[in-house]
Image (tube, rainbow, N blue to C red):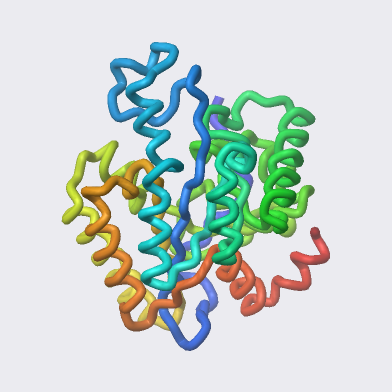
Amino acid sequence: MSQDIELYDYRPITEREPLSWPGGNRVAFYVGLNIEHFYVDLPGTATYEGTTALTPDSLNYGWRDYGPRVGIWRQIKLLDKHGVKASALLNSDVAARYPQIIEAGVRRDWAWLGHGASNSHLFTGLERDVEQGEIREVLRTIEQATGVKPRGWMGPGLIETFHTPELLAAEGVEYVLDWTNDDQPYPTNVPGLLSLPYSVELNDIGVFVSKGLSGPDFVQMVKDQVDQLYEDAADGSGRVMALALHPFITGQAFRTRYLDEALAYVVNHPGVWTTTADAIADHYLAVTGQAAASRSAG
């Protein structure tokens, strides 16, 4: 059986009203910082596939666990250095296990997005009522830990069911990052729910693990991305640049200099608005006149 997508309509970027960013900037830039928890008896992102069937898989689990123990603290220093507030893609299980990370993000006024309970449990094959309960619990846990109810969502592994968007909107979530198919926000066919740009290409897992590229390759990709988006937006319609980071990848010591260089290039690039996913959604709703409709739908 074949099925076309019903969540959103096709509207090419060449046939949209111009989209402006604050201060006349051409590119809205945010860092999606994946803050995740993995379980030692379940498979997850792996640097070596040969041990993923073992329990415990100490090789891969230890690599992932480097992130909250060490890697994220390097990344936080770099984000602070360059004046970047993270858009934290947060597994709710992090709240109880790594409270120091939550405290660091709250002090820095990060944007907090729901990212499931853990990255060992994907949103797939769930009955509707079970999924609704899990979404509600994730949002409640994050709100209790951070003082902020998430307005955005990215599924663990960017995975959804056919019910996910509707269930998210029913819980007050305003935007999702899962679909990675555009350079601008756009309204979905679920009332009150936007899709915001995210990237599986400009994503440190894809760059370093899937493709096996180098630090200089990563820097060049970031530079090329912002340069091209800036050029694309010369027509008066702004673009979004998302940089997806994981503490166990670009938090590694030998990659620090390259993340530093990449961030420096983007935040000092002319016409770049360094911001958060929440602020991008707010501005898009305001300038497209959808803010009132979104609040009404919620």
- Image quarter (top left, top right, bottom left or bottom right) of the C terminus: bottom right
Residue 82, how many percent across, how many down? 37, 71
134 sits left or right of 282 in the view? right
Residue shown at 43%/15% (left/top)?
A: 56
Residue shown at 58%/37% (left/top)?
A: 97
Residue shown at 29%/16% (left/top)?
A: 50
Residue 18, how many percent across, how many down? 51, 79
255 sits left or right of 126 in the view? left
Is residue 155 visible to us here? no
Q: Against 163, is 13 above or below?
A: below
Residue shown at 54%/57% (left/top)?
A: 104
Is residue 269 visible to us here? yes
Q: Against 132, is 277 above or below?
A: below
Furthest residue toward right? 296
Residue 204, how many percent across, how many down? 33, 47
Residue 199, how many percent across, how many down? 41, 52
250 sits left or right of 23 in the view? left
42 sits left or right of 215 in the view? right
Q: Against 61, is 283 above or below?
A: below
Taking depth in this image into account, of 288 and 227 the one nearest to the observer is 227
Q: Against 71, is 85 above or below?
A: below
Which image quarter: residue 223? bottom left
- Image quarter (top left, top right, bottom left or bottom right) of the N terminus: top right
Furthest residue toward top? 54
Which image quarter: residue 262? bottom left
Taking depth in this image into account, of 151 and 126 the one nearest to the observer is 151
Taking depth in this image into account, of 131 and 89 the one nearest to the observer is 89
